[in-house]
Image (cartoon, rainbow, N blue to C red):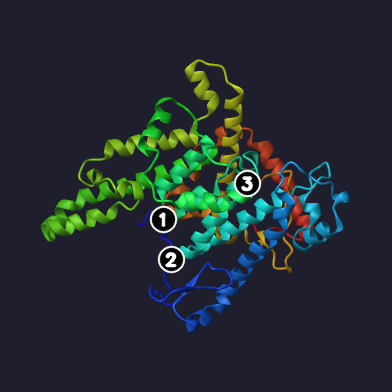
Amino acid sequence: MSIIKAPIHCCYVCYTRSNLFVCKTCFAVQYCSKEHQALDAARHLPECERIKEAVDCTIPLLDLCTDVSILRAVENLPTEIEKRTRQVFDPESLLYNNRSMNFQSGYRFVHRALIRQLGEMNTKSSLSLALYKAVALDQFGTRRSRKFYSCTAATLLRLGQEQLAWEYARRESLGERPYGVKYVAAAYADLLKDRKPRFDIWKDMQCVFVARLTPGTNRMVVWILLLHRWIKDLEDLQAFRSVEDAVVARLNYDVAHEIRGHILQTELLSGRKDLSRGDNRDLIEQLKRHREYFLYADDRARAEAAGVAETSSMKRTRLAMKRLMEGLRASVKGSDRGAVDVDDDLITSAGTRLGPIYADQDSPREAFMVYYPLWRDTPGAIDFVRDFWEHNASWLDNTGLRSLRISNEHIHKLRQERAGGPEIF
C-alpha cells in the first residue's frame, strides 16, 4: 500500500506524461492536447474558477495589511479602500469586538482555502503553486499571525520532500529568516535551493525524546506524520520478510531483492539501504514510542515527572497542543462523512464574495484543513488519532477543549444565521 497518494504528473484525461501544458487560467492541471482540455472542461471549470477567484481577491488585500500594526476603524476606512474591500469581503465579517478591521485574517483565510484546494487537486503543478502560496502565507505578517500551523511544511510533505519539510520547520522554529511580503520570492528560492541537509532528523528527534522536551506545534504536526509514515514503511518491510523465503524459493533472489527495494517509499528510509537488510523491529517500537509521546504527552505531566514547577512557556505550549488536538479532532470527525469537500464553501460561488471570516477566532478547524488531506491520504493516520480519542475520552474532556468547542459552536451558529441555512461541515 502506498504511504501517501503520489502527486499526478500527467495529462488529467489520458494520463500520458509527454507534451504536457498547464491550464492558463489556474496553472494547476496539465493536459497533453487542447482536445483533452476541452473534454475535461466541465469537471475542471468550477475548481479553476475558485482558484482564480482566490488568487484575485488577495491582491487588493496586500496593500491593506502590509503594516500589521495598523488596524483601521471600520467607520474611518477611506472610501476607495472600503469599496475594494466590499468587492471581495463582507467587512463586518473581518471585525474584532472593538470594531477595528483585521485584513490579515482575511488574507490568511483565503490563502489557506486556496492552498487546500490546490492540495486536493494533487497534481505536480498544483502543488508547486500551493508551495509558492504557502511560502507567501508563512512570510506574511508576524510570528503571532502564524502561531500554530505551517502550510509550507504541509505542502512539502505532500510533495514527499521529508528532509526539506524538516529543514523548513526547524529553521522556522529557530527564527532564521526575515518576515514580510517583499521576502517571498527570496524565501521561495532559498527553500528550493540545492544544499546538503543542515539538520539530522534522527538526531533531532532522539534528543527531544530523551530530554522529554516539546517541539513547537508547527513542528509537531510534521513530526507525527513523518513518524507514522516511517512506522508504516518499516512494518510493510517486516511483513515482506516473513514471506521472503517463499518468494525466493518460488521465483528467485533477484525478484525478492527487487520487491524489497520498492517497499520503502518514504524519502528518508528509502535512502538508508541498511534498513532493507536488517531486522527493524526494535526501531519500529522506538518510533512508536516517539509517536505516542509527541501526540499524547502533556506538559504538566512532564513537569511533574521531572519534579519541576510548570512554567509559563509550558502553559503556552500546552495551549498550542490543545489547539492542535482540536483541529485533529474536528478533521477526524469530518472524515466520518467523507470530508473531501467539507470546506467547499470557504470560497462561495456568489460573484467574488467570500464567506464569513471571524477574526476573533483563528479557528483550528479552518487552519487544519490545509493538513487534513495529508492525514486522510496517509494509510492508518486517521485511525491512529481516532483510536486515541476512543480510548482516552477522559483525557480529552480534561484538557480544556470544552471551552474551545463552545466558542466554535457559537461561531458556527452565527455562520448559519448569516448564510440562511446549515453548514456543509
Of the residues tagged 2 and 3, which is closer to the observer?
3
Is tag 2's residue or tag 3's residue first in the polypeptide sequence? 2
User: What element does badge 3 sit on?
Assistant: loop
> How would you rate the neighbour count of disc 3 (Cα within 10 Å): few for under 14, some for 14-19, many for 20 or more?
some
What amino acid type should be assigned to the residue bearing mark 2?
A: Ile
Residue placed at 40% from the left, 38% from the top? 199
**Mark seen at residue 152:** none
- Residue 415, percent from left and from top: 75, 54
Of the residues tagged 1 and 2, which is closer to the observer?
2
What amino acid type should be assigned to the residue bearing mark 3?
A: Gly
- Cα distance in 3D space between marks 2 and 3: 32 Å
- Residue 85, percent from left and from top: 78, 58
Any part of residue 336 in sight: no
Residue placed at 23% from the left, 43% from the top? 274
- Residue 203, percent from left and from top: 36, 33
What amino acid type should be assigned to the residue bearing mark 1?
A: Ile
Q: Nearer the viewer, residue 205 or 339?
A: 205
Judged left or right of residue 163, residue 100 is: right
- Name the residue that disc number 1 marks: 4
Residue found at the very far right of the displayed protein: 75
User: What element does badge 2 sit on?
Assistant: loop
- Residue 256, percent from left and from top: 18, 56
Q: Are marks 1 and 2 in contact (CB under 8 Å)?
A: no
Of the residues tagged 1 and 3, which is closer to the observer?
3
Q: Which of 129 and 123 is in front in this view?
A: 129
Is tag 1's residue or tag 3's residue first in the polypeptide sequence? 1
User: What element does badge 1 sit on?
Assistant: loop
- Name the residue that disc number 3 marks: 180
- Name the residue that disc number 2 marks: 8
Q: Give the quarter of the image for residue 361.
A: top right
